[in-house]
Amino acid sequence: MTNISIGSIRQHTVGLEILNVGGESQVIVDAIIVATGARPSLNMLRELRLEVDASTEAIKALGPLIDPNQHSCGTVSSHGAEELKQPERGFYLAGMKSYGRAPTFLMRTCYEQIRSIAAEFAGDHEAARKVELPLPSSEAGPNSNRCSLTAVVSSTTAAAT
């Protein structure tokens, strides 16, 4: 459903009834899932020197690599400590914070980011720069934000066996 202004939601005998602002019933549903997106809160980092991409609010070096207008989760290039380092000496951003508002983040990405940063801290610069990140293919091509959950599961399962 698109282009609807919800006035109220009320319990119905078979689910939830959505009423428009005029009080007219629009649809009855089993559940409502609110997918409003995410925006990183960098407030705790305000005193640090950070480089942030203006459009995605991701790490500046990652911005072009993860831009959802150009990439899906299956087309993001491998990246690690080198791309995640900040102007603040010894400071890196990893995980969801590193991706800003981009919806292409996967936990597998975070694990590899952390491995690379840990290798950098340990002084193993070669291991830190050897970033291997096999990603699932995108179901709908490079301009889609949808990733194949089946591919994620089968890749994970294959790696575990």
Image (tube, grey):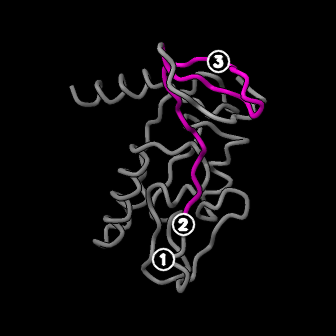
Q: In x, y percent, where is residue 52?
A: 64, 68
Residue at numbered disc 3:
27
- Horizontal side of residue 129 vs 145, given as left or right: left
SS class of the residue under badge 3? strand
In the picture provided, is 160 more to the left or to the right than 141? left
Residue 29 at x, y percent in the picture = 55, 19
Asked if residue 63 is positioned above or below residue 152 in the image, the reply reads below
Q: Is there CB contact under 8 Å for labels 1 and 2? A: yes
* Other-residue count near label 1 (Cα within 10 Å), few / some / many at <14 / 14–19 / ≥20: few
Tell which circle, 3 or 2, labels the residue nearer the N-terminal end. Answer: 3
Disc 3 vs disc 2: which is toward the camera? 3
Question: In the drawing, what numbered circle is on residue 141?
Answer: none
3 or 1: tag closer to the N-terminus: 3
Q: Name the residue located 64 percent from the left edge and 61 percent from the top edge.
A: 57
Q: Quadrant of residue 56?
A: bottom right
Residues rendered magenta in the picture: 14-40
> Between marks 3 and 1, how big is the CA–CA gap?
42 Å
Amino acid identity at mark 2? Ser
Residue drawn at 69 percent across, 36 percent down = 7
Q: CA distance from mark 3 to mark 2?
A: 35 Å
Q: Amino acid at mark 1?
A: Met
Reply above or below: 62 against 70: below
Q: Is residue 12 magenta?
A: no
Say if the magenta span includes residue 15. yes
- Tell whether label 2 touches label 3 (CB within 8 Å): no
Q: Is residue 147 left or right of residue 71?
A: left
* Residue 32 point in image, percent of width and height: 53, 29
Please name the residue that numbered disc 1 is placed on.
44
Q: Which mark is residue 41?
A: 2
Residue sticking out furthest to the left: 161
Rendering quarter of residue 3: top right
